[in-house]
Amino acid sequence: MGIFDGLKSKLEKGLETTSQKSKKVLDISRLTLQLRGKKEYESELHMRLGRSLYERWEAHGDMEMTDRTRSLLYNIKEIREVIQSMEDQLTELKKEEERKHPPENMQAPPSREVKTERQALPSGDDLPGERIQSSSNQTPVSDHKTSSSWDAWEGQGIFLCPHCSKEVRDTEKNCIYCHGEIYS
């Protein structure tokens, strides 16, 4: 039973680690979404400030600092500080996550450049297609019919057993390998 206890403890540790990692990822995702919302709000405040200044310019022809302008600038400054603290917190969470769980598929950049050179084609004596090892199953290249004599190939075919896909003679009624019936 020691095997099962060891397996159980390893499984529990794995689940705990996965749970902690998932919690960190969720925290990072939540913080990222909050940060995006704050940035959108900051952008909206900038638009309001611009609109307020434009309206003041249109109405009075000057750019005087009004209470509304002062309030918008103060809000922008506050939201900017909140965004900065959230970005720092997010950076810290990401660094902590990378320290605890380094990326598995991270690869080192190649240390040297591989150069490929074109080699000259081998001479006619060294062509790979010309080298034929003789054995009982192989026939020399010179014994094969060339593609220029199509008349010699006409009417020839390969017959396969429909059950085992082995090659059989065209005159056989039963396969010699699987003994299945060959339909003609």
Image (spheres, grey):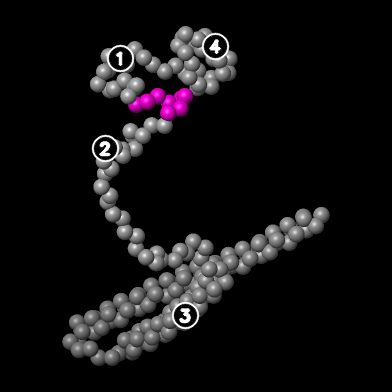
The reply to whether dot 2 and dot 4 touch (C-beta < 8 Å) is no
Q: Residue at x 24, y 84 (%)?
A: 56
**Residue 12: horizontal and vertical position, in percent?**
70, 61
What is the crowding at mark 2: few (fewer than 14 residues within 10 Å), some, or many (at least 20)?
few
The reply to whether dot 4 and dot 3 touch (C-beta < 8 Å) is no
Say if residue 36 shows up in the picture: yes
Q: Identify the residue position indicated by label 1 in the image.
A: 152
Q: Name the amino acid, label 1.
A: Ala
Residue at the outermost left position: 61
Numbered disc in front, either 1 or 4? 1
Report the disc number at residue 86. Answer: none
Residue at the outermost right position: 1
Segment tinted magenta in the rendering? 134-141
Q: Residue at x 61, y 68 (%)?
A: 20
- Secondary element under disc 3, as helix, strand or loop, is helix
What is the crowding at mark 4: few (fewer than 14 residues within 10 Å), some, or many (at least 20)?
some
Mark 4–mark 3 Cα distance, whole angstroms, equals: 79 Å
Which of the 4 image quadrants contains residue 143?
top left
> Quick check: 17 above or below 117?
below
Sequence-wise first label, 1 or 4 = 1
Sequence-wise first label, 3 or 2 = 3
Numbered disc in front, either 4 or 3? 4
Q: Main secondary structure of the magenta part?
A: loop
